[in-house]
Image: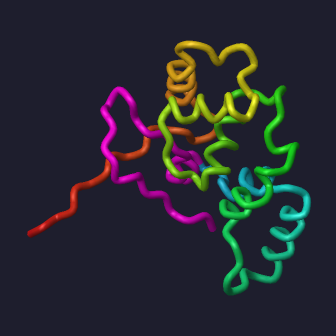
Amino acid sequence: MPKTQTARTETHPSHNPLYFINLHWYEETNRSFSVLLTTRLCATHREQQVATATKGKRKGEKTPLSTIKGCCSRKPEFFHPNMPIMEAIFRLLLSNENQPMTAEEISARLVELGLDNNWVRDGAAGVVRRLIEHDRVYGLSPAPESQPASGS
């Protein structure tokens, strides 16, 4: 089962929210994050995931998100230039272990990966923001704002 997600503690203005994969969205929409995650693993780790599912998790075994970050996302087929932009954003968040990122961070990283596909120019962060805010497939959403610690 994927680890739960918590937002960064830094504050970001409301016009520059952090985005992440909302695992609660999968529960609310009766979708399986685990299935979607498994299909993004490289062939070797997909086979290991199936074996683990039948035998049970062993102590010290990596989570699928850390496996994607440490191995699968480094394979050439994980990101490719003809990939739909929403899939690329989803995979980018997976490869970042679902740590929340701003639209600016996401668009800059997509450029670094060579996934700009002629849309990444001035205003690319605005495009990323609009795409994420209208997502109905991947569960992408603004991360909850950090809660102040109670000192009572």
Percent position of residue 27, x then y: 55, 53
Q: Quadrant of residue 32?
A: bottom right
Please, what is the dominant secondary structure of the magenta stretch? loop
Percent position of residue 101, x then y: 50, 41
Numbered range of the magenta stretch: 1-29
- Residue found at x 68% / y 28%: 111
Residue most extreme to the bottom: 59
- Residue found at x 37% / y 46%: 144
Q: Nearer the viewer, residue 32 or 22?
A: 22
Name the quarter where the C terminus is drawn: bottom left
Q: Is residue 141 magenta?
A: no
Percent position of residue 12, x then y: 33, 38
Percent position of residue 42, x then y: 85, 55
Relative to residue 53, is residue 28 depicted above or below?
above
Name the quarter where the N terminus is drawn: bottom right
Q: Nearer the viewer, residue 141 or 118?
A: 118
Relative to residue 86, is residue 74 depicted above or below?
below
- Residue found at x 65% / y 40%: 90
